[in-house]
């Protein structure tokens, strides 16, 4: 199958959605589909009409592969996107490109592109990570649904699926079909739930925490004492991700090292200022780390944290706490380390008492106690970690891509 993936934001970037799009494009390739990716660019250097001549405007594939942790190469086309046109110009260019190429399927997270390609009768899959907002959001979503090309809607959590079902005319399998006990397939299904995933191959044969700390200290110079219990967090530092909790834990547990990986420079600087103001000597901030190197940093920790708050900001500023499916969750599970997570309802779709410790987001005493308990009980840490690793086996990007495309030719809406 020839699949045209239309990215919603510029490649490369540090936004989580760009990582997810690149991982999914690679997954289609690894499933033996001829796949090409379209990406917007704010100020193209060399163009012919609307399309950029070069496969990469100044970006070498090796750099992209390191940035996103990729193993399989694919073609990328960049198209101009003028900010005042709100991606409509880019969507038109990308959809035209997909049609000229003869794509059998358009796959996108960009509502503007999905609405256009579906309305033109091009087979289209739309993936959504949040509820359609505002007049334009609901209009574009409705245009995708009503277009003759709409083939499948992919949502990342059951919570999001439930809310969409309440407010839009979306067909679902009958409850009788679910109760037969027969293996479930996507044959004829329009909406499917597909949480995010992980590249398990990149999380095989990882070093022990002590070995990983030794390697990082040697290669990066990070002050990571090999014999100190180390707690980690990886990801962005947007509001609601729990940085206040992380610093409070570091303050309460000076005998532990807290390794915080990720964040934009201004956010890292602000957090470093707070660390300095509190005179914390057990917090190590790294800033952004390329995805290819991320497993080694996560492996350096005995415990990995997801201290999400009740309201979680996305890169766009909206609250995603009700629907989030964080990629770090699956990376943590694959790393075979104990996980401490806020007990948000949506995270309970993946996590449970057997593969993680779930805690009230705002109860710092519970977090302190849980970390102390895990430090003193290595057998319990290992039991949680092993169960998480078993549970994540079905959440690979390749399996996700196959699940999304299963039965796609039989779907009509």
Image: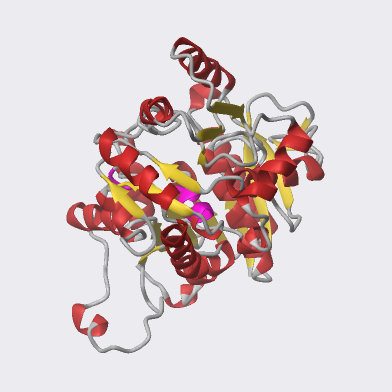
Image point (28%, 46%), residue name: 359
Residue 192 versus residue 237 in the image, above or below: below
* Quadrant of the frame with the N terminus: bottom right
Q: Residue 384 at x, y = what percent?
A: 42, 61
What is the basis of the colouring in this image? Answer: secondary structure
Residue 36 versus residue 112 in the image, above or below: below
* Quadrant of the frame with the C terminus: bottom left
Kindly indicate the quadrant of the structure image that contains residue 72. bottom right
Pick the residue in front: 76 or 278: 278
Residue 38 versus residue 100 in the image, above or below: above
The answer to whether any part of residue 196 appears in the image is yes
Pick the residue in front: 145 or 198: 198
Q: Residue 304 at x, y = what percent?
A: 48, 46
On whether residue 328 falls in the magenta region, the answer is yes
Tell me: 27 left or right of 179.
right
Q: Residue 324 at x, y = what percent?
A: 37, 46
Magenta stretch? 322-332
On whether residue 79 falls in the magenta region, the answer is no
Pick the residue in front: 222 or 393: 222
The total of numbered circles placed on residues is 0
The answer to whether any part of residue 320 appears in the image is no
Tell me: 282 left or right of 103.
left
Image point (39%, 33%), residue name: 241
Image point (66%, 63%), residue name: 204
Q: Residue 208 at x, y = what percent?
A: 64, 54
Tell me: 151 left or right of 51.
left
């Amino acid at each position: 199958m020839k699949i045209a993936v239309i990215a919603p934001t510029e490649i490369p970037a540090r936004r989580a959605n760009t990582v997810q799009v690149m991982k999914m494009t690679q997954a289609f390739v690894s499933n033996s589909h001829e796949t090409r990716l379209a990406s917007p660019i704010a100020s193209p250097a060399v163009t012919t009409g609307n399309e950029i001549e070069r496969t990469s405007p100044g970006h070498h594939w090796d750099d992209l592969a390191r940035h996103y942790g990729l193993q399989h190469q694919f073609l990328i086309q960049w198209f101009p996107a003028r900010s005042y046109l709100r991606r409509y110009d880019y969507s038109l260019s990308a959809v035209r490109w997909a049609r000229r190429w003869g794509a059998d399927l358009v796959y996108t997270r960009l509502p503007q592109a999905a609405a256009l390609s579906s309305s033109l009768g091009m087979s289209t899959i739309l993936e959504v990570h949040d509820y359609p907002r505002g007049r334009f959001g609901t209009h574009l979503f409705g245009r995708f649904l009503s277009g003759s090309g709409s083939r499948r809607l992919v949502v990342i959590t059951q919570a999001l699926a439930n809310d969409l079902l309440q407010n839009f005319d979306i067909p679902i399998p009958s409850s009788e079909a679910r109760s037969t006990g027969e293996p479930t397939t996507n044959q004829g299904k329009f909406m499917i739930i597909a949480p995010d995933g992980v590249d398990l191959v990149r999380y095989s044969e990882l070093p022990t925490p002590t070995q990983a700390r030794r390697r990082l200290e040697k290669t990066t110079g990070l002050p990571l004492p090999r014999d100190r219990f180390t707690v980690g967090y990886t990801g962005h530092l947007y509001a609601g991700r729990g940085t206040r909790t992380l610093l409070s834990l570091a303050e309460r547990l000076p005998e532990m090292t807290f390794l915080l990986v990720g964040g934009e420079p201004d956010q890292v600087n602000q957090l470093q200022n707070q660390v300095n103001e509190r005179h914390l000597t057990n917090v190590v901030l790294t800033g952004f780390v390329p995805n290819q190197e991320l497993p080694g940093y996560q492996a350096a920790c005995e415990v990995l944290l997801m201290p999400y708050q009740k309201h979680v900001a996305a890169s766009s500023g909206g609250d995603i706490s009700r629907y989030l499916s964080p990629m770090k969750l699956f990376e943590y599970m694959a790393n075979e380390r104990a996980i401490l997570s806020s007990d948000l309802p949506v995270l309970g779709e993946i996590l449970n008492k057997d593969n993680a410790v779930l805690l009230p987001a705002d109860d710092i005493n519970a977090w302190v106690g849980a970390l102390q308990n895990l430090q003193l009980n290595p057998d319990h840490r290992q039991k949680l970690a092993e169960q998480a690793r078993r549970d994540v086996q079905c959440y690979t990007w390749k399996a996700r891509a196959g699940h999304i495309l299963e039965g796609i030719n039989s779907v009509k809406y």
